[in-house]
Image (cartoon, helix red, strand yellow):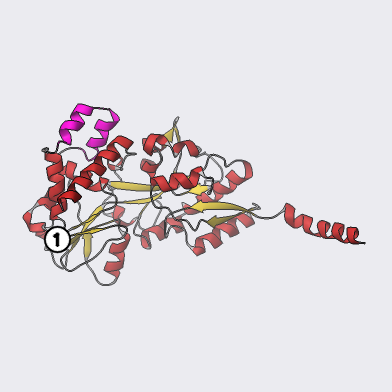
Amino acid sequence: MVSKLILFSILILLPFQLFAVEKLRIFTWPGYVTTENIIQVNKILADKGYNYQVEVLTTQAEDADQMFSVIRNKQCDITFLTLFFIKMHGEQISKLLQPINIHSPRLTNYKNLDPKLTQISMGMQNGKPLYIPWGGGVYGFYVNTQKVKKHEVPKSVKDLWGVKWRNKFSLNQGQFWYNVGLTLQALDYHPFYLDQLAQNNDRSALKELLSKQGVLLDKFKQLYNNAGGFWQSSTKFTENLEIVSSWGPEIKVQNDKGGKWQLIDFEEGHLAWLDTINFVRDLKNEKLAAAEVVANYFIDKKVQQRIVDELSMLPASVNLDSRGLLDNYPNLFNADLFVPPYSQLSYSLMQQMVEQVEQVE
């Protein structure tokens, strides 16, 4: 009798075990995937007959090394990698990803992506992209037009070294490579000149550039000494600041409260970043197809418009009612100014520059 009950229980439960919904795990940055997004994309998957549902990792993206660790430990299926992370430190992350089939019938929204963003070399492998452009921004400097008159607004990054702006602007402290780039621009170098020398293994030129008595280090110290504030993850607004550096979202919050912060369109251009959608190497068959459906949802017009309106990001899609800052500054996404995948050497050298500045302080 007992054996018959056990058999009956197995037969009842078997269909549920056979068709248990599997998870597609998404690893992303804070605010990128909302609860509403999850509900909507899961409905799309169910309607299309996929036996998968998305689940967002509670662990949120922080930096290249952390993202590499999570991907290597096979804790995710879909990622939102910053483009230059893909080939940092010996291309370690790129080895864990697979090329995107841009001709997949499930990526119907791919055709609406800005073509300038779909073939960026640092995200390519053997002529195929390891990424789908999603959204990004610039390391922007915003001026408080309630305090600064139009004719006083800086036109060049070089102006940040002037006496007029001493203690009146802020810098990001954690991602110091942007500040190194600004310093190189102020010296009429390309912002990634140091990394270019490192990539070419030009040790003598690097030694001269980074000499303790050299112009670069001195200029870098001046920039940090001139700054009126530093921030880590989110821009801070204080009474003394007339210019703040920002990734963008905080500016919208301030302006919604009645502020009048406006991007300074430096003549040297803006150092840019792009966050992307990626598939881990082990995805295949139906699970890969489901991942493509998910990616297609996130480059849909509605989601792309949300990241403009709610996150103040620059969207990858072009078929939108508004592309945010790109409407007024169409060249913000200048491929020549996308932060590169810094080599271990150049990254270490820039860290040393920061340490020397902090020792002085």
Farthest residue toward the right?
Answer: 1
Q: Is residue 332 left or right of residue 281?
A: left
Q: Is residue 38 visible?
A: yes
Q: Residue at x 43, y 37 (%)?
A: 92
| Disc 1 secondary structure class | loop
Q: Residue at x 54, y 45 (%)?
A: 74
Farthest residue toward the left?
Answer: 163
Residue 154 sits inside the magenta stretch: no
Locate residue 307, reporting x and y percent.
39, 58
Q: State which quarter of the image contains the N terminus.
A: bottom right
Position of 86 relative to 155 (above/below): above
Q: Nearer the viewer, residue 326 or 261?
A: 261
Residue 325 sits in quarter: bottom left
Locate residue 214, reporting x and y percent.
12, 37
Q: Nearer the viewer, residue 49 or 191?
A: 191
Q: Which residue is mark 1?
A: 168
Locate residue 223, reporting x and y percent.
15, 50
Magenta span: chief secondary structure:
helix
Which region is colored magenta?
A: 190-211
Farthest residue toward the bottom?
Answer: 257
Residue 210 sits inside the magenta stretch: yes
Locate residue 224, reporting x and y percent.
16, 52
Q: Nearer the viewer, residue 65 or 13?
A: 65
Neighbour class for label 1 at 10 Å: few (<14), some, many (≥20)? Answer: some
Q: Is residue 20 left or right of residue 351?
A: right
Q: Amino acid at mark 1?
A: Lys
Q: Nearer the viewer, residue 224 or 237?
A: 224
Position of 45 relative to 111 (above/below): below
Farthest residue toward the front?
Answer: 359
Q: Residue at x 85, y 59 (%)?
A: 6
